[in-house]
Image: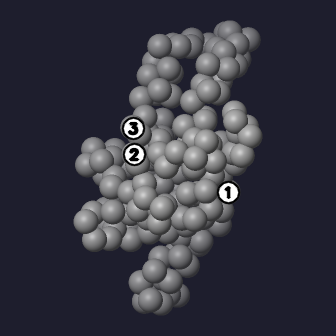
Amino acid sequence: MEAGKPVTYSGQGFSLLGEKGRFVLPPDFRKAVRDSGQGERVLCLGKHPRWKCLTGFGLGRVQEFEAQLDREEEIALERGVEFDRDDRSRQLYGFAKVPFDDSGRFVLPERFFKLGGLEDAVFFQGGGKMFTIWNPQELAKMGAGWEDAIEACADLQAQALGGKGKK
């Protein structure tokens, strides 16, 4: 992977909480996070600013934050709306760095269970520059426009549980 080249997170994945309190980052996401961090196995996690879920990305995305802040500030000025750069910076840079092993296993810091409404199963949804991590019940509340993600989550959850609960 070229240094500084952005990666894209696409697709879906699912993980049950395993032994030693670990989730497993799906292979495609694991590779993208590692590529973004120039080989480092570090998952950056934060609370999504609007939805009851977490965001995940690799270390390389941090290099894009100042340009993103500049764009958001410019758009706010054009629209004549308030923009609190300090508050938005806090949201972007307030992530936790969580190591994962070669198999993608990582321990989710305790506070993120509460922040993301997470329990014993998580759904990963690709979102371009980042991905989201959902409690399946929280995702199911999203409604219109989320049908594909909701169905993918249900299918992957049924597979993870050995076909139990499949429609």
SS assignment at label 1? loop
Who's the residue at 28% across and 71% down the image? 19
Who's the residue at 42% across and 54% down the image? 100
Question: Which of the two discs, 2 and 1, sits closer to the camera?
Answer: 2
Instruction: Give the spatial CA distance, label 3 vs label 2.
Output: 6 Å
The disc, 3 or 1, on the residue closer to the chain's N-terminal end is: 1
Q: Amino acid at mark 2?
A: Val
- Residue in front for this viewpoint, 3 or 86: 3
Q: Are marks 2 and 1 in contact (CB under 8 Å)?
A: no
Q: Amino acid at mark 3?
A: Ala
- Residue 123 image position (x, y, % from top left): 49, 63
Q: Can you tell which quarter of the image residue 122 is in? A: bottom left
Who's the residue at 53% across and 76% down the image? 156
SS assignment at label 3? strand
Q: Is residue 141 visible?
A: no
Q: Are marks 3 and 2 in contact (CB under 8 Å)?
A: yes
Q: Which residue matches tag 1?
A: 10
Compared across the picture, whether 150 is left or right of 165 comes to: right
Note whether 79 is above or below 143 in the view shown. Answer: above
Q: Amino acid at mark 1?
A: Ser
Q: Can you tell which quarter of the image residue 79 is in? A: top right
Q: Which residue matches tag 2?
A: 98
Q: Which residue matches tag 3?
A: 96
Q: Can you tell which quarter of the image residue 36 is in? A: top right
Compared across the picture, whether 78 is left or right of 155 comes to: right
- Residue 82 image position (x, y, % from top left): 57, 11
